[in-house]
Image (cartoon, rainbow, N blue to C red):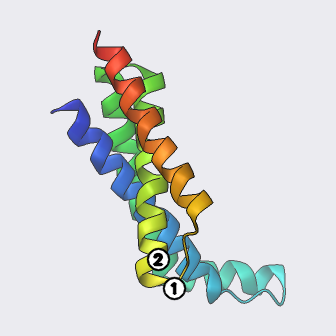
């Protein structure tokens, strides 16, 4: 399977994992340790997070077998950060100011430079 396809799958699974944890975490019962554990086990969002984590782990391990750990980790993390920010704006009414947009641009530029340096 193509290295970049595996990276994309891992990044999307990372995004899914984080979105499910955020959504599931909002409904947790923090009254006691027992109620917290029960609410985690009973939460569909937490089970979706576990499934996303399994996909992330599988795709990531497959990707690092094909290419360097440094590029793969950087790519998965950078892509997930950009996608999470976009979804935060679209679904969570988060805002992106100029400094944050510049930071995301630098993340993307860093990924491109890192990927180009690996191929030469």
Q: Name the spot of residue 101 as percent of width and height, x first.
A: 51, 59
Residue indicated by mark 2 = 89
Q: Is residue 16 left or right of residue 28?
A: left
Observer-nearest of 5 and 108: 108
Q: Which residue is drawn at 49% across and 54% down?
A: 81
Sort mark 1 into few (<14), some (14-19) or many (20+) by Cα contacts within 10 Å.
few
Observer-nearest of 53 and 100: 100
Q: Residue at x 42, y 72 (%)?
A: 87
Where's the C terminus, which quadrant?
A: top left
Residues at marks 2 and 1, CA–CA distance in whole angstroms: 5 Å
Q: Total number of numbered labels?
A: 2
Residue indicated by mark 1 = 93
Quadrant of the image occupied by residue 69 = top left
Q: In this picture, is 67 found above or below 30?
A: above
Q: Residue furthest front?
A: 98
Q: Name the spot of residue 102 as percent of width and height, x first.
A: 53, 52
Q: In this picture, is 82 found above or below 32?
A: above
User: Can residue 77 be seen by looking at this rendering?
Assistant: no
Mark 2 touches mark 1? (CB < 8 Å): yes
Q: Which residue is drawn at 36% across and 32% down?
A: 112
As drawn, the label of residue 12 is none
Sort mark 2 into few (<14), some (14-19) or many (20+) by Cα contacts within 10 Å.
few
Q: Name the spot of residue 25 as percent of width and height, x first.
A: 63, 79
Q: Name the spot of residue 105 as percent of width and height, x first.
A: 46, 48
């Amino acid at each position: 399977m193509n290295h970049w396809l595996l990276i994309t799958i891992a990044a999307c699974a990372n995004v899914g994992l984080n979105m499910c944890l955020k959504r599931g975490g909002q409904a947790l019962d923090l009254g006691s340790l027992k109620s917290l554990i029960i609410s985690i086990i009973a939460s569909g969002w937490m089970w979706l997070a576990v499934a996303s984590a399994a996909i992330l782990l599988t795709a990531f391990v497959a990707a690092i077998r094909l290419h360097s750990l440094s590029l793969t980790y950087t790519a998965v993390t950078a892509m997930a950060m950009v996608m999470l920010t976009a979804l935060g704006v679209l679904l969570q009414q988060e805002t992106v100011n100029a400094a944050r947009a510049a930071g995301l641009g630098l993340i993307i530029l860093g990924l491109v430079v890192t990927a180009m340096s690996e191929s030469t």
